[in-house]
């Protein structure tokens, strides 16, 4: 996963109002973002568990949790984030996939403006 901050001149047109935007090269988040409204959570969860390893999912969860926490804190709604303990054990990947989908659901329901772009390398 790579993190890059771009000046406004490199930002796509819909994000022109931001001073800078963070770009995260993450295949997992790109996949979830592009399929979140097309597939059910159970379908997404199955695909995440089958395709990505535990470390990839954990790294992505930590990154997304930081972004969502920051957005909720800036909006004065930091208490609305559910507790997400560190996942351990045999079924860690299942719990991490659940947490990722919970975070995406929070972003969708709260209409959070997370000025980050999640993309993958082709």
Image (spheres, rainbow, N blue to C red):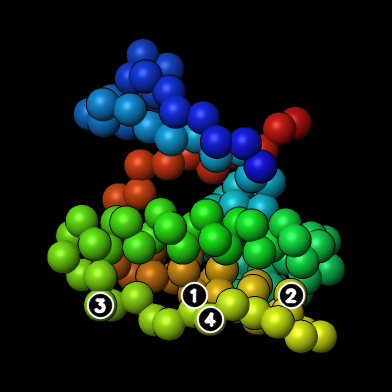
Which class describes the residues within 10 Å of circle 1: few (<14), some (14-19), or many (20+)?
some
Picture quarter containing residue 98?
A: bottom right
Q: Residue at x 67, y 53 (%)?
A: 28
Q: Is residue 15 above or below residue 59?
A: above
Picture quarter containing residue 6?
A: top left
Q: CA distance from mark 2 to mark 1?
A: 14 Å
Q: Is residue 14 left or right of residue 66?
A: left
Q: Is residue 89 above or below residue 116?
A: below
| Residue bearing the label numbered 3 | 79
Q: Secondary structure at mark 1?
A: helix
Q: Is residue 6 left or right of residue 36?
A: left
Depth check, mark 4 against mark 1: the one in front is: 4
The N terminus appears in which quarter of the rendering? top right
Q: Secondary structure at mark 3?
A: helix
Which class describes the residues within 10 Å of circle 3: few (<14), some (14-19), or many (20+)?
few
Locate residue 100, reporting x and y percent. 56, 68
Q: Is residue 29 left or right of residue 106?
A: right
Q: CA distance from mark 2 to mark 3?
A: 26 Å
Of callouts 4 and 2, the N-terminal one: 4
Camera-nearest residue between 122 and 63: 63
Depth check, mark 4 against mark 2: the one in front is: 4
Of callouts 1 and 3, the N-terminal one: 3
Q: CA distance from mark 4 to mark 1?
A: 13 Å
| Residue bearing the label numbered 1 | 102
Of callouts 2 and 1, the N-terminal one: 2
| Residue bearing the label numbered 2 | 93
| Residue bearing the label numbered 4 | 85
Q: Secondary structure at mark 2?
A: helix
């Amino acid at each position: 996963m790579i993190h890059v901050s771009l000046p406004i001149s490199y930002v796509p047109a819909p994000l022109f109002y931001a001073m800078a935007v963070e770009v995260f090269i993450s295949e997992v988040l790109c996949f979830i973002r592009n399929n979140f409204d097309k597939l059910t959570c159970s379908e997404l969860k199955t695909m995440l568990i089958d395709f990505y390893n535990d470390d990839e999912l954990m790294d992505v969860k930590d990154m997304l949790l930081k972004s969502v926490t920051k957005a909720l804190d800036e909006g004065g709604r930091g208490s609305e984030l559910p507790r997400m303990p560190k996942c351990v054990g045999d079924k860690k990947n299942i719990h991490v996939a659940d947490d990722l989908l919970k975070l995406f659901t929070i972003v969708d329901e709260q209409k959070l403006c997370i000025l980050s772009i999640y993309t993958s390398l082709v």
